[in-house]
Amino acid sequence: MTSYLVRRGAASIVVLLLVSIVAFLLIHLQKGDALTVKLRQRLPEEQVQQLRAEMGLDKPLWEQYWTWLSGVLRGDMGRSFFREQQPVWDRIKAALPVTVELVALAIVISVIVGVPAGVISAVRRNSLLDQVTRLFSVIGLTIPVFWLATIVLVYGGIWFSYSPPLTFQQFWESPMRNLEAMWMPGLILGYALSAITMRITRSSVLEVMRQDYVRTAWAKGLGEQVVIVRHVLANSLIPVITVLGNQFVYIIGSTVIVEYLFHLPGLGFVAFESIATRDYFLVQGTVLVIGAMVVAMNFLVDLSYAWLDPRVRLAGTTQI
């Protein structure tokens, strides 16, 4: 088990390093730079070069990357170019709870809706209820999240006079105002994720129900609820947990446009805003934090997978 954890931890560090390189290169290889966006008027070339030197944009890319990375290792992500030199970490720290709450809400909705629907669909296979739940999942899989969010905003405003609040308050400040802003985007993301959860749960339950030990449980005369809960559902969790971990990657990407559409000041909104203004340090810091969240979630999924399935732990002790 220790060897398994060490290998997974080392792989996570390598992935984070690669994420930092990609985040740095993608924003720096675009035409123009942060100074071009920041300046709204033409200035003498000498003054432009002086400003570029002050911002550190006159150095080679490898030197700029090393300066930034060494600062991150010391706990300093730099300062924003466009927010009065506000520390990047302060900006990210303020946005992080919003994204974490939105992701948690979507995953909870996904589990509450998707797992029971998948189990019921598998147990009542080929019934009308099965057909309805499968149609529900197909619609959720085919509709893009950004399109569904746009439709909700447009027709929700026309038919139900719905509009997202223009100001956001944290849950500990005002629970009702917070839920007023969060429930609709959480429901939209949760619906898309529940469709995936339902399909995987259904497939996993159907596979487990064909196993010999389940047939033996039926032959003993055990009730349907006992067989499903004790013998089927417990052994169907591993694929579902794996998918939930992968959903975290999907939902983090979806939060960018959803947070922007619903005026939620989360990491997705910060990333969208900082990319538009070429705020280098803020873009790099936001992408690095999001990457760290994804890597951490995958690491936790690996741990849970090893905990639930002893074969994974044994494989980790024998493989190099």
Image (cartoon, helix red, strand yellow):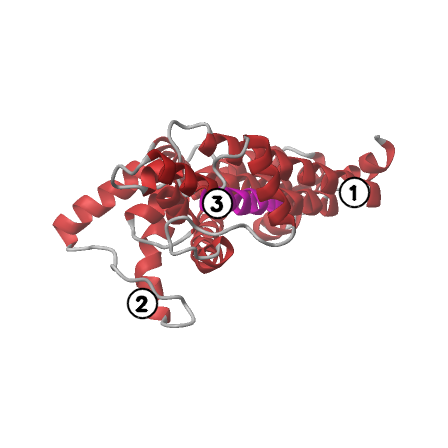
Q: Residues within 10 Å of mark 2 (few under 14, many from 20)?
A: some
The answer to which quarter of the image holds residue 277 is: top left
Q: Nearer the viewer, residue 310 or 283?
A: 283
Say how many tags the image has. 3
The answer to which quarter of the image holds residue 192 is: top left
Q: Earlier in the sequence, mark 1 or mark 2?
A: 1
- Separation of marks 3 and 2 at Cα, in angstroms: 32 Å
Residue under numbered circle 3: 281
Left of 185 or right of it: where is 284? right
| Residue 30 locus on image (x, y percent) | 41, 28
| Residue 19 locus on image (x, y percent) | 57, 36
Q: Residues within 10 Å of mark 1 (few under 14, many from 20)?
A: few
**Please, is residue 67 above or below residue 163 in the view?**
above
Q: Nearer the viewer, residue 112 or 13?
A: 13
Q: Residue 310's mark?
A: none
| Residue 311 locus on image (x, y percent) | 79, 37
Q: Nearer the viewer, residue 1 or 129?
A: 1
Q: Amino acid at mark 3?
A: Phe
Residue under numbered circle 1: 6
The answer to which quarter of the image holds residue 160 is: bottom left
Residue at 59% of width from left, 47% of height from top? 228
Residue under numbered circle 2: 177
Q: Secondary structure at mark 3?
A: helix
Q: Is residue 145 visible?
A: no
Q: Which residues are magenta?
A: 282-297
Residue at 54% of width from left, 43% of height from top? 288
Q: Residues within 10 Å of mark 3 (few under 14, many from 20)?
A: many
Any magenta on residue 293?
Answer: yes
- Separation of marks 1 and 2 at Cα, in angstroms: 44 Å
Q: Quadrant of the N terminus?
A: top right
Secondary structure that dominates the magenta span: helix
Q: Amino acid at mark 1?
A: Val
